[in-house]
Amino acid sequence: MPAISKHKPYRVGRSRTGLGLFATKPIKKGTKIVRYFGPLLDSRKKKDDAIENKYLFELNGRWTIDGSVRENIARYINHACKPNAESDVKPRKRKVFIRAIKNIEPGEEINYDYGTDYFKAYLKPIGCKCEACERKRRKKRAEARAERQRLKVKAERKAQKKAEKLAKAQEKKAQEKLKEKQKLKLNGVKANDEHLNGKSRSKIARNKPAATEPQTLAASPDPNQMAA
């Protein structure tokens, strides 16, 4: 890792993507932070045009800066979709400076937008890991968790309602069975009572003495008639 002067307002440190450049002092908006530099490549030359790496910074259709050299501290600045710095390109001077577009606090990582071409070629295939994209992913994950929880609660409520409905149906069925049982029992008691009453009536009829014909007493002879 290249040595950095203590007077510089930045340091190289660990970031979520590997190494990054971090502010060590407050950096005001509009401040030129660091120069992006390296050998100039001429696209008209085959040997220059054949060079490929992730640190190529195109100035115009002809000139490109090869920023892969160790001394180029600016190469440690990572991409961000919502950056706090930007590249200030000066094609005529063949120079590039990284300039703050926001106030940057100590400890905050310095970043700038690498551009659409770089994003499509190198970042999109593996997924951008800048803070803005991470927040989006966290938000989506949180929304997905919330949706799963909502569906889970909905399913639990549905299952609970179904269980309550089933329990009510079973209770109603049990009550109907109990009523039917009580009805049958009551009907059995009535039938038994009627049977017993019938038996009693028969027994009484059998034990009751038979009705007798009224007896006619023979008339006593009339004494007068006997005398005659």
Image (spheres, rainbow, N blue to C red):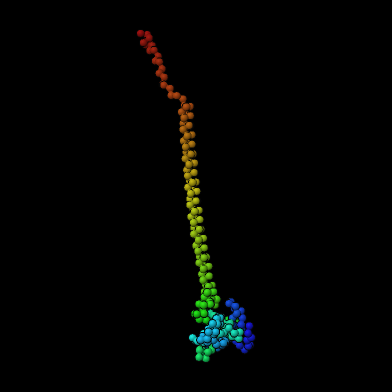
Q: Is residue 21 left or right of residue 160?
A: right
> Residue 202, can we see it?
yes
Give the residue displayed 45% in from the left and 24% down from the top: 210
Could you say which is closer to the camera, residue 131 or residue 161?
Answer: 131
> Residue 86, can we see it?
no
- Name, please, the residue furthest toward the top: 228
For the C terminus, the image quarter is: top left
Residue 197 horizontal/vertical position (percent): 47, 34
Residue 83 horizontal/vertical position (percent): 53, 81
Residue 23: name its quadrant: bottom right
In the displayed structure, 91 sits above or below 117; it is: below
Could you say which is closer to the camera, residue 101 or residue 176?
Answer: 101
Give the residue displayed 46% in from the left and 31% down from the top: 201
For the N terminus, the image quarter is: bottom right
- Name, please, the residue furthest toward the front: 46
Could you say which is closer to the camera, residue 146 or residue 117?
Answer: 117
In the displayed structure, 113 sits above or below 219; it is: below
Give the residue displayed 50% in from the left and 51% down from the top: 170
In the displayed structure, 161 sits above or below 106; it is: above
Residue 180 horizontal/vertical position (percent): 47, 44
Residue 120 horizontal/vertical position (percent): 50, 77
Give the residue displayed 49% in from the left and 46% down from the top: 177
Q: Is residue 26 left or right of residue 172?
A: right
Counting every numbered tag in the picture gives: 0
- Name, please, the residue furthest toward the bottom: 93
